[in-house]
Amino acid sequence: MKFILILLLSILTLGANDAQLKKQIGRMLVIGFENEQIDENSKIVKDIQKYDLGGVILFDRFYSDRDKTKNISSPSQLQDLTKKLKTFSKKHLLISIDQEGGKVARLKPSYGFEKTPSAEEVSTMSLQEAKEIYNTQAKMIKQNGINCDFAPVVDLALNPKNKVIVGLERSYGASSSEVTKYAKVFIDSLREQNVISVLKHFPGHGSSLDDSHKGFVDISKTWTQKELEPYQNLINSRDADMIMTAHVFNSKLDAKYPATLSYSVNTKLLRQKMGFKGVIISDDLQMKAISKHYTLKETVTKAINSGVDILLFGNQLASNNADELVEIIYSQVKNGAISKKRIIESNRRIENLHTKNSIIYRPIDFGQKRIDMTKTYIKQHYGLNAKDITIDPKIIVLHWTAVMDFEDSFKRLKGNTLYSDRGDIADAGALNVSSHFLVARDGTIYQLMRDNFMARHVIGLNYSSIGVENVGGEGNIKDDLTPAQLDANIRLVKYLKEKYPNIEYLIGHHEYQEMQNSPLWLEKDANYRTKKADPGEKFMNKIRGNVKDLGLKKP
């Protein structure tokens, strides 16, 4: 009897693990579907709920019948569709679209949307004019429920005979610096509306002669290293959140595989050499450049193993459903052709992308006056003559505000100078306390300042720590932070560790004095200490239990 119970338990555990793996695979898929309207019985809804699908891509018309509506016919229809998609999804869902402007625009004026000029046309305008155009477009995208735009194009217009980029006016020009400038304006406008941008088509499609929609594209003789420059510029400025690979073959980079399937291109070049930490998404894997030469099993296996995190199936050029895709990838993981580690890596990057995109920027006052006051604090307390107030984060410190209202909490952090009721620390300087992030009771994460500027939030450790305040801790004693705040802090810690790999410690504010023997402790005043209770042992234990895989140390 005992043996039977153990066997049953093993079977149940195995089944649960398999279901979890299939959902992790589902998070790596963005799929097209055929409906203008959906309900709980729609196939796409069932796929979203069964597999925690990563996202969908929307088109206005069918590729094979340009007179037939696919997903978009009007603003009111689109808003209803995207609202239902979000409602039916239990997790963050990428609702994506190709909205570059010009000839590549799914939101067309003929359906009732604002017209956006092409990249080529925008490149003749001032940056201020470009900003106004892209602000209008970004607001339109956001208002219609889209949270991911497969744009901007950062391909260089190097080949006048290029049909798919230059011929369609999709490039800002041949100069990498000009392309970078206009692309950054596009990205900034999207980011202000919490819409994810996607740079494309890596490692460069602007010098090609052929169209990867239709077949094999070899850029070996036309491609130059210069085509990498816009990507490198935007990676360096931390403006690249997601990058789309191109189905182009380049023997200079990989003698065997096109970029989408190439480990040399996606991992060795883009990740290791160029330092990209974000999400890599494939271009549509049903394009003939891929589907004519590789089986579906070969395609998904090689793409994932090359370093691609999200596989895009537009279901415009062919038809592949989520069940089929998940089962193929699942079988490849089970037989060892794809490692479970790769699935976990991609899921982590996707989760961090959603966390970053969910953060709302709500700036406190941080002009030159506060910067100068911070330098004075650094000199007074750490004995350092700081040229600037940039930090190299090594610690994440979690707090509670001891104030139950969000606006009251924000108000106390906003100004340059310390509130008059902070007599406990007033002698240590007039610089106001602050924090890099503030988490509301409903779990919404607000960023208050640059996360690599020093904030005054923890004695002795400010010069190496990122502070996260949580609205709560009534009376500075009550352990009352919400489940939503717990989830938000877990996601934020994971995101910050990914962004700053050198972070070593995760501590609660109440634990800060245990760091006094650490080389990170810089406080010179032996009498400057305060006793803290926030954010409580129970909260910290739950956080640590959920981020064990990050290897963060306690004090």
Image: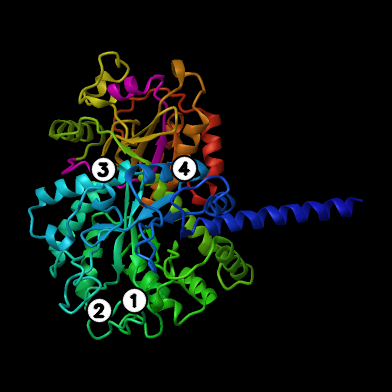
Residue beneath the point at 55% across and 54% down: 43
Q: Tell me which segment is drawn in magenta.
A: 385-412
Element class at badge 1: loop
Name which of mark 1 and mark 3 comes first in the sequence: 3
Alpha carbon distance from label 4 to label 2 = 40 Å
Main secondary structure type of the part rendered in magenta: loop
Q: Is 72 located above or below residue 448 in the figure?
A: below
In the rendering, at what x and y percent does residue 431 appear? Answer: 22, 26
- The circle on residue 212 is 1
Q: Do the residues labelled 3 and 4 touch (CB within 8 Å)?
A: no
Name which of mark 2 and mark 3 comes first in the sequence: 3
Name the residue beneath numbered marker 4: 84
Q: Comparing marks 2 and 3, which lies closer to the viewer?
A: 3
Asked whether 279 or 326 is in front, the reply is 326
Name the residue beneath numbered marker 3: 139
Alpha carbon distance from label 3 to label 4 = 20 Å
Q: Is 540 located above or below residue 216 in the figure?
A: above
- The circle on residue 467 is none
Q: What colouring does the structure picture have? A: rainbow
In the rendering, at what x and y percent does residue 446 appear? Answer: 34, 35
Element class at badge 2: loop
Image quadrant where residue 174 sits: bottom left
Name which of mark 4 and mark 1 comes first in the sequence: 4
**Mark 4 closeness class: few <14, some 14–19, many ≥20 residues within 10 Å:** some
In the rendering, at what x and y percent does residue 497 appear? Answer: 41, 49
Alpha carbon distance from label 1 to label 3 = 31 Å
- Type of amino acid at the residue the image marks with label 3: Lys
Name the residue beneath numbered marker 2: 208
Q: Do the residues labelled 2 and 1 touch (CB within 8 Å)?
A: yes
Element class at badge 3: helix
